[in-house]
Amino acid sequence: MLRREFIVLASATLASLSMGLTGCGKQNVAASYPVLPTDVCTKSPTFCEMCFWKCSGWVHSKNGKPWKVTGNEQDQHCLGRLCTRGSGGLGAYEDNDRLKTPMIRITNSDGSQGFREASWDEALNYIAEKLATVKGEYGAESLALFSHGYGATHWKTFTKAFGSQNITAPSYAQCRGPRTEAFKATFGQGVGSPECTDMENSQCIVLIGSHIGENLHNTQVQELGTALKNGCELIVVDPRQSVAATKAEHWLPIKPSTDIALLLSWIHVLLEENIFNQDFVTEHCTGLEELKKECASYTPEWAYPITSIQPDVIRKTARTMAKNAPATLVHPGRHVTWYGDDTQRSRCIAILNALLGSWGSKGGLYLPQKAKVPKYPLPAFSKPKWTWKDLENNKYQLASAAVASQVRDVTADPSLDPEHPIKAWFVYGSNLMMSLPEQKKTIQAIQNLDLLVAVDIMPAEICGWADVILPECTYLERYDDIRVSPGRKRQIAVRAPAFEPRFDSKPSSWIVKQLAQKCGLDAWFPWANQEEYLSKRLEPLGISLKELEAAGVMEVGQQQPLYFADGAPPTFKTASGKVELVSSLFSHAGFDAVPRYTRHPEPPQGYARLLMGRSPMHTFSRTTNNPHLCQLKDENELWMHPDLAMLWGVTHGQRIALENQDGEQSRYRIPVKVTQRIRPDCVYMVHGFGHSEKKMTRAFGKGIAENELMTTIHIDPIMGGTGRRGNFVVPSALTRTEAAHQQEVGHA
Ligand SMILES: Nc1nc2c(c(=O)[nH]1)N[C@H]1C(S)=C(S)[C@@H](COP(=O)(O)OP(=O)(O)OC[C@H]3O[C@@H](n4cnc5c(=O)[nH]c(N)nc54)[C@H](O)[C@@H]3O)O[C@H]1N2
Ligand SMILES: Nc1nc2c(c(=O)[nH]1)N[C@H]1C(S)=C(S)[C@@H](COP(=O)(O)OP(=O)(O)OC[C@H]3O[C@@H](n4cnc5c(=O)[nH]c(N)nc54)[C@H](O)[C@@H]3O)O[C@H]1N2
Ligand code: SF4
Ligand SMILES: [Mo]
């Protein structure tokens, strides 16, 4: 009972973190619970896997029972505080719907298919045999790994040792890929993760869609709160009044899909009024004159009918940015695959930061530090005959990582690239049915596979399509690799098991080593166990695993300056060695060297554009069955302006099904939230709900998975990103009767 109360209370405080932004309670909520003198309390270090911010914390047990998870005070990812989801991490461990044993797909005597429980040995033998056949027939390169999360290290090593470098993740072409390529083209490097945004020192922050406060990346939420307390001016561009927009000086409810026009107009005003950072531009940038020429016509009066943002607002906000520069941050965002011209929108954001002199400046983008931790010494991997780069004749030439949707597409339709067959997938910690658009193509691809292995902790939808399901234990029950991420400090962190794995689940470090033995790849897995692996990696740093476990987080290496003003060397790894306002990389590759605005398709009469975002209580589809977090939010809702509700004839609280422009219907219903906080031409829901897997008993059938309605995709020609916000919806009659639906999902 106590644990339940702890979660609810923690969420109350942390809800204020997400809703109030300034209300970040310093103490850990759970600490207010009394510890009796007779209680025996222990703690072990972890870093959180509830999302990918990797906050370091402590897992506490009381009298031998799991008690709570709290933040590590020394950690720069969390500053001592975990978010709602991180505090709810015990729910991942406790969830009885978890995968319990390995399973192998079988065909029953009546021809129907099912799964049977298998021992680890059987399951891994099955995989090893299939892999050998696939390798013999199509080559080792025909194995692809999709992964997300910190446990993937050994799966990546296995894939490379096997002979394939087709390693991909939806967190590139479905998330931040466009930003990476745009910032690399402009500054010679990306902004990393966690992003090198110096928000705590910013005097002006501009959020383009980025909905920090609902997007709960911990330090960013805390730093935005600090900045606002210190008088930072906030400008939020969002068709919906996000939580951040409620705190903003200026909320610009832009017409969706027109951000490039606004950004170009801001660039125009900075240049036209000569209020850009002349020192920074003269010293570090190339291409000013060409940029001026290209942007000469993008007046606020030009942008107004496109974006619906008044010219005087565009001028005023541009001047606010200039006044506070270089302590102005035009936030690069993170999930930026929106409309298919996303690399160019991200380029506009990069150019603005260059004109303001924010790169390498206090309050803008600091120069990230990273600890140097040598890799475990391993034999070299053999060179594959081909890699993802070769797919469809190097179709996305500027993509710096494999495009998950392209790997899926060539699997689904081998005629796209007969020379490069993909016949086996390992899917680690990635629910592709929810995270890759065009679900039908994903199903088609799976039909063409000789082997699909899903490694997960939950019976996620992808598992239902697998040949073999491998149950990993949760992050609270395992060691993983050392956390080495960029930040203000050169920190490393460790995750150690707090509890024994429940059921017959195992850590990937164990699973992969066993599989490697069966595949004759032992040479790449020479350690006895994960502790030995970690100790060996730490050896050159002069740190023992014990020491790191005692501290959770440690600093290694010499701290370097974060800003040019403090002596950081201005090096830009672009072709010119300068910040490129006009991109030579893009023009060589045949793309616009200066971004241009293009019009996007509009919703047909009566339809609304479908927008999506994040719930502060959940991470994607991975936490919606969490027994604690689902109590805080168990269903998404459809945000809709009163005018649209009137047009559609629906009322607040009514449950409706949706149909998109391609006639695709949602599986379930979603309650309507009528609110003035959104434009009438779009609707909005958070991602992660609408699970169709019955084994996830709490999440099954609750809300709508917007992914089902994302059947029209606008692909970014520069790096293959899948723009998903060009889908339009209307209410629909659910094909099944209400009674059948009730019976299936068992709730109203
Ligand atoms: N429709 C739609 N698609 C999207 C998005 C969207 O908003 N809408 N967002 C995009 C973005 S920003 C991103 S980054 C990607 C993310 O998409 P994915 O990479 O697919 O990531 P998740 O949805 O987090 O994948 C979650 C899976 O990991 C499992 N899991 C959780 N913890 C563990 C663990 O410790 N070990 C193992 N083996 N498995 C674990 C969960 O049970 C779940 O099945 O999706 C993109 N796709
Ligand atoms: N709680 C929680 N936090 C998370 C995650 C999570 O699952 N849960 N996931 C993490 C991950 S991997 C990512 S990538 C980030 C994603 O988080 P962000 O990068 O912040 O989010 P986006 O999905 O790009 O943006 C959603 C916002 O864009 C607005 N929007 C929609 N269309 C437009 C448009 O045309 N123009 C403009 N200007 N705005 C528009 C929406 O109204 C919404 O407010 O969140 C991270 N943080
Ligand atoms: S932001 Fe929250 S969910 Fe993500 S790692 Fe940190 S505590 Fe965990
Ligand atoms: Mo993401």
Image: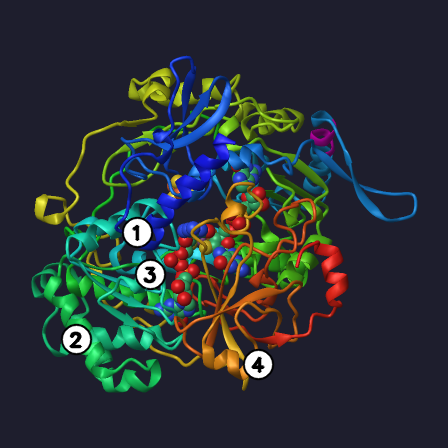
* Tag in front: 3 or 4: 4
**476 to the left or right of 708:** left
At 11% from the left and 60% from the top, the residue drawn is 280
**Mark 1 Cα shell of 10 Å, populated few (<14), some (14-19), many (≥20):** many
Q: In the rendered structure, which disc, 3 or 4, sits on the residue that comes first in sequence?
A: 3
591 left or right, relative to 204: right
Distance from mark 1 CB to nearest ligand 2 atom below 8 Å: no
Residue 307 seen in render: yes
Between the residue at mark 4 and the residue at mark 2, the CA separation in whole angstroms equals 39 Å
* Mark 1 secondary-structure assignment: loop
Q: Which residue is mark 1?
A: 191
In primary-sequence order, the first of circles 2 and 3 is: 3
Residue 123 highlighted magenta (yes or no): yes
Q: Mark 4 is on which residue type?
A: Gly
The amino acid beneath tag 3 is Ala
- 397 w.r.t. 659: above or below: above
- Residue named by callout 2: 316
Mark 1–mark 4 distance (CA, rounded to whole Å): 45 Å
Position of residue 186 measured from the top left corner of the image (x, y, whole percent): 27, 60
Instruction: Compare marks 2 and 1 and give the one earlier in the sequence.
Output: 1
- Image disc number at residue 649: 4
- Residue 94, image x and y in percent? 57, 33
Q: Quadrant of residue 345?
A: bottom left
- The yes-or-no answer for disc 3 within 8 Å of ligand 2 is no
Disc nearer the start of the sequence (4/2): 2
